[in-house]
Amino acid sequence: MEYGTLDALVSTTTLGAARKGFRGTVVSVLPIEGVGRLPADEMERRLVEMGFIEGAEIEIIHEGPIRRDPIAVRVGSATVALRRRDALAILAE
Amino acid sequence: MPNTMPTGGDRTARVALIGAPNSGKTSLFNALTGSNQRVGNYSGVTVERKEGTATTPGGHRLSIIDLPGTHSLRARSPDEEVTRDIVLGAYPDVPATDLLLVVADATHLRPGLRLAQELKRVGIPVLLVVNMIDIAAARGIEIDLDRMSAELGLPVVASTAVRKAGMAALHARLDRMLDEGLAPRGALEWTHPTATDLRAALREADRVIAASVRLPAAPRTATSVIDTVVLHPVAGPIILLGLMFAMFQAVFAGAAPIMDLIAAGFESLAAVVEATLPAGLLRSLLVEGALAGVGAVMIFLPQIVILFLFILLLEDLGYMARAAFLMDNLMGHAGLHGRAFIPLLSSFACAIPGIMAARVIDDRRDRLVTILIAPLMTCSARIPVYTLLIGAFIPARDVIGGIGLQGLVMFGLFAAGVVSALTVALAVRLVFRRHEIPAPLMLDLPDYKLPRLSGVLLGLWQRAWTFLRRAGTIIFAASVVIWVLSSFPLPPEGATGPAIDYSFAAAIGHLVEPLLRPLGFNWEIAVALVAGLAAREVTVAGLATVYAVSSPGAAALGTALAAEWSLATALALLAWFIFAPQCLSTLVVIRRETGRARWMWVTVVYMFTLAWLAAFATYRIATLLGG
């Protein structure tokens, strides 16, 4: 494994833990089986349908009033509201 | 066999409109069909079916169907299943589609372009309509339609559905396509896309956009400016609460002058009838039965129109999704999905569209809970009852800062509906769904759009007409039935008490009364409540008829009630109406939407139980406090 790849892994954060104002690029969309009610592959398809694909530019533009949840994420020309729990599947740098 | 389909005068081309939610599909449908549209249901499911006809400038006849909005043919909800089945030609009573109009939002092309690629594989000719091109142009977004068409391999045309001139290009293109003849249906190559397929399609859409669209540098749109305030963690909820409060004040205070006018109109109508007809059964039927009953309900039309005006405006504006965003966490604690906010808010107008709107929730259990609590939201049919009782028993004085006590009580009743709905959802969650993981929330926050006056007016008219039709049919019939029940049998010769004491209505009322006596309800209320099982507002008509018959020539109904009932009784009746499932149509819709009679009975039992307990507690406490 090249060092570059490792650096990329170190500098990634999950969108679920990021704060308002976070800007980045999607590194991977990988829901984990059992975390949500939906099967992981269905969750992955839905996130992709909303525009979350590797390389997409994203920015957290709003946080919900209670416990900063859900978050509103700008992705491409769309704004999508996600719960933090569901956003954990999205890794960004 | 001809390889092109004959079009022109002899054959109507069947066109299906398909697009992502918020793509302006419905306004395009309205622009194409004008008033030649009808709304119904697909057989077997309660998905709204909108169909219309149109004739192009070139004389081609089109039969257009507006499909429920969808991101893909993957069908995750009953709505999307209908869309998929019609597109794939698998829906039983819809003839095969000849042409698919894929609607894409010019300011947000990605979902539309992705959907168009998926639909290319279905085997039906596709025309991509880039809608809202005017908004895109105003934002400095430049779209090269020819390039897009070449990259995509599909014909592309731009439109502005909300302006006449904006439809010219689409009409011209449709005429050209129909003159040339549409290609016959090809082979069906569509398969369920995997996540990899979806990624590839999205990348392809991005490639097409990169090749054919020039975006202005970092646009700070009005939407993002508004959202910094509207979605602010502190200001946002305050604005939401303020909007709700303004809505209820407008419903209560704003409608009053028009309501007085309608009431005066019915009174003078009754006076005319009394002046023309001799005293007798016919005059009694017309004045005390039909006019008293229908009039008592008709005066609430202004309030219902104002309520729907707010809901339609907020919906068109794009605020509803923001409200769902702000409410999601709170609703999540109650075991509800953020998306449930929209069905529940619609239920403020009427539980029926609310229950049907619950179809946007794709998780079956979340949807069921939303359906079961939707009737607890204060629907517009409760407004007549609330207004009558508040007007009669709550003094019209200012509390603090010009806020009326009556408006405040009204707000309290609405709040009680919301709180009890959330409490029931929470109880369901704690008892039955303790270990469930919540379903995901993925909500598109669309750009704000100025509502179109014509669209809002059309929507208002449809709602007002539904109400008027109910007043003219169910409520009219119920008023007449109640009049018959309270007039017959005629009192014996030489009877001393009021005539109604000898009637069937009195017998029914006395029969039910023991059940309701602990709540402080008399037999007149019992009659009205039995009648009100048909619909809540019939209760008002029922009271009007019962009291008009028992004391003809009495003043306004409110005054009569204030004289007859104690405050405790009135408050208990208000509490009863927060909970009681007094609406047959809602129960029928619950049965249809859940597919099981069982859930309808669950609703009946739990709501009547709550109503009885709440009214009982209210009556006892109010009596203790000296009501």
Image (cartoon, coloured by chain):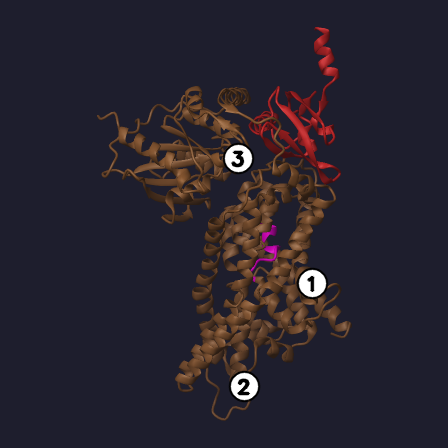
Chain colours: A red, B brown
In this orientation, which residue lies closer to the viewer: B250 or B51?
Answer: B250
**Seen in the image, is B310 located left or right of residue B41?**
right
Q: In terms of sequence position, does the residue under pointer 2 or pointer 3 come before the other? A: 3
Q: Chain of mark 3?
A: B
The residue that mark 1 highlights is: B408
Per the rendering, the mark at residue B498 is 2
Query: Which amino acid type is marked by label 3?
Result: Ala
- Report whether mark 2 lies on the same chain as mark 3: yes
Q: Along the line of sight, which residue is nearer the eye, A72 or B623? A: A72
| Residue B399 point in image, percent of width and height | 74, 66
Q: Nearer the viewer, residue B559 or B532?
A: B559
Decide which of tag 3 and tag 1 comes sooner along the chain: 3
Q: Which residue is mark 3?
A: B138
| Amino acid beneath label 1 | Leu
Quarter of the figure with the N terminus of chain B: top left
* Among numbered discs 2 and 1, the one appearing first in the sequence: 1
Q: CA distance from mark 2 to mark 1?
A: 37 Å
* Element at label 3: helix
* Distance from Cα at disc 2 to Cα at disc 3: 72 Å
Residue drawn at (69%, 66%) of the image: B404
Q: Are marks 2 and 1 on the same chain?
A: yes
Query: In the depicted view, which residue is nearer to us: A47 or B526?
Result: A47
In the image, are marks 3 and 1 on the same chain?
yes
Q: Check disc 2: other Cα within 10 Å, few if <14, some if 14-19, many if 20+.
A: few
Q: Quadrant of the C terminus of chain B?
A: bottom right
Q: Which residues are magenta?
A: B371-381
**Residue B469 image point, x, y percent:** 44, 62
